[in-house]
Amino acid sequence: MLSLLWTLLVLPAPLLGSLFVLGRLDRKARLGAWSTRVWAQGLLRIYRVQVQAQGPRPTPGSFVISNHLSWLDILVLASLYPTNFVSKSEINEWAVMGFLSRCGGSIFIDREKRADTHRVTELLRWFLSRGSTITLFPEGWCGDGAKLLPFKRSLFAAAAQLETPCIPTSIHYSRPEAIWVDESHLIRHARKLFRGGSITAKVYFSPPIIETDRKTLALQCEAVVQQTFHPST
């Protein structure tokens, strides 16, 4: 109930603001990123999630690469810097989360269609070239916390072509129950976390990497995230 009330309180900002940026996708994306940050900070307080961040925060126009453990990852990272996320197309079809993701300026990709990679890559190039910060979970889905999953490399092309600074990032939670590996019912999982007590989310931002080759960039980012990755027990 608290989550719903906070969402309803914040939601008018991007909805009303979008009326003043009609036809300007870059400004709409920045408005969505700002709104998502405010929304995320409030939800983390409700769920008693304390975020501890190490390393310099991503600057505008960065390409943030992070491991993926839970739906909480989005709130944790969004609370630290304004960003637009790359999300799987299935989320866009969810009644509530799809609507909220669109308001937040998410970029959706259909992982089942190889041809969609080119479309999303061009979108990422466009947004990054205009100073938007993009966050990507290159594992593709939530890991089990025991090990880092192999990175999917396709979407690194946009950052490589623009020589955009890529920020390898790792997230670790103090409670293993935060992991959402089977992507089970979100509300049920959220209720379980709320009843379980406070959580500490540790985020480590590594120094930026700039590389002109997509595969090399992906491998370097994966290696750095692996170094700061802490298995959940």
Image (cartoon, rainbow, N blue to C red):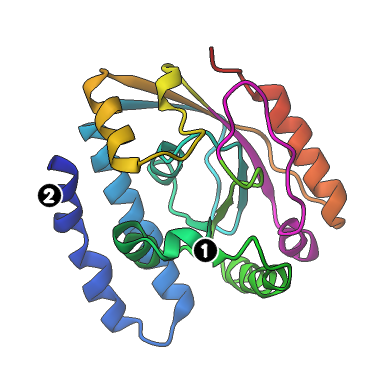
Give the residue at x 77% y 52%. Answer: 153
Tell me which amino acid carries mark 2.
Answer: Leu
Instruction: Give how far across and how far down residue 87 sits, in percent.
Output: 52, 57
Give the residue at x 41% y 65%. Answer: 93
Which label is found at residue 5? 2
Query: Would you say residue 156 sits in the magenta stretch?
Result: yes
Cα distance in 3D space between marks 1 and 2: 26 Å
The quadrant of the picture occupied by the N terminus is top left
Under circle 2, the secondary element is helix
On the rendered structure, is 220 left or right of 187? right
Going from N to C along the chain, the mark reached first, 1 or 2, is: 2
Where residue 41 sits, quadrant-wise, is top left
Query: Badge 2 local density, few (<14 within 10 Å), some, or many (20+)?
Result: few
Residue highlighted by disc 1: 89
In the image, 163 versus 72, the foreground residue is: 72
On the rendered structure, is 115 left or right of 81? right
Task: Read off the magenta span.
Answer: 142-171
Up-down relation of residue 202 to residue 91 (above or below): above
